[in-house]
Image (tube, rainbow, N blue to C red):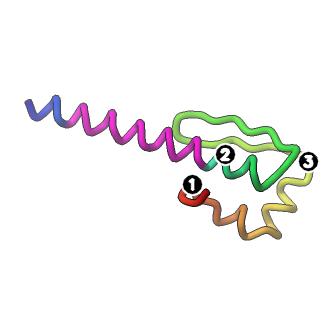
Amino acid sequence: MMSQLLKRGEELARAAQRERTKRIASRLKQLVGGIAIEVEEARVLVSGRGLLKRWLTDPQLRFLTGDRG
């Protein structure tokens, strides 16, 4: 019974992590145009011309979370 509870907890945690990752990717798409975004289970891969310079100057990108919007 305990192993089933642990398994269910892990499944819920993975689902929540996937949802948060999707929210972060969505927020990035809203903030920055012309970028490529690849979403994996636990990470968001972003690439695009001039992205590094923008990330260095824009605090909205540096401190991006999936909590807003």
Residue with the mark numbered 3: 49
The crowding category of the residue bearing disc 3, from other C-alpha atoms within 10 Å (few below 14, some 14 to 19, many at least 20), is: few
Q: Judge depth for marks 3 and 1 and give the one in front.
A: 1
Residue at the image position 40 percent from the left and 37 percent from the top? 14
Mark 1 and mark 2 residues within 8 Å of each other at the beta carbon: yes
Q: Residue 66 carries which label?
A: 1
Tell me the kind of residue under disc 1: Gly
Quarter of the picture holding the C terminus: bottom right
Question: Looking at numbered disc 3 in the image, what kind of residue is underneath it?
Answer: Arg
Seen in the picture, residue 31 relative to 46 is either above or below; the reply is: below
Residue at 80% x, 38% y: name it. Answer: 36
Identify residue for label 2. 26
Q: How crowded is mark 1: few (under 14 residues within 10 Å), some or many (20 or more)?
A: some
Label 2 packing within 10 angstroms: few (<14), some (14-19), many (20+): some
Q: Is residue 19 left or right of residue 56?
A: left
Does the magenta segment cover residue 48? no
**10 magenta-colored:** yes
Report the side of 11 relative to 35 (left or right).
Answer: left
Label located before the other in sequence (3 or 1)? 3
Asked if disc 3 and disc 1 are in contact, CB closer than 8 Å, the reply is no
Spatial CA span between label 3 and label 2 = 19 Å
Of 56 and 68, which appears nearest the observer?
68
Give the percent coordinates (x, y) of residue 4.
Answer: 16, 29
The single residue placed furthest to the left in the displayed view is 1
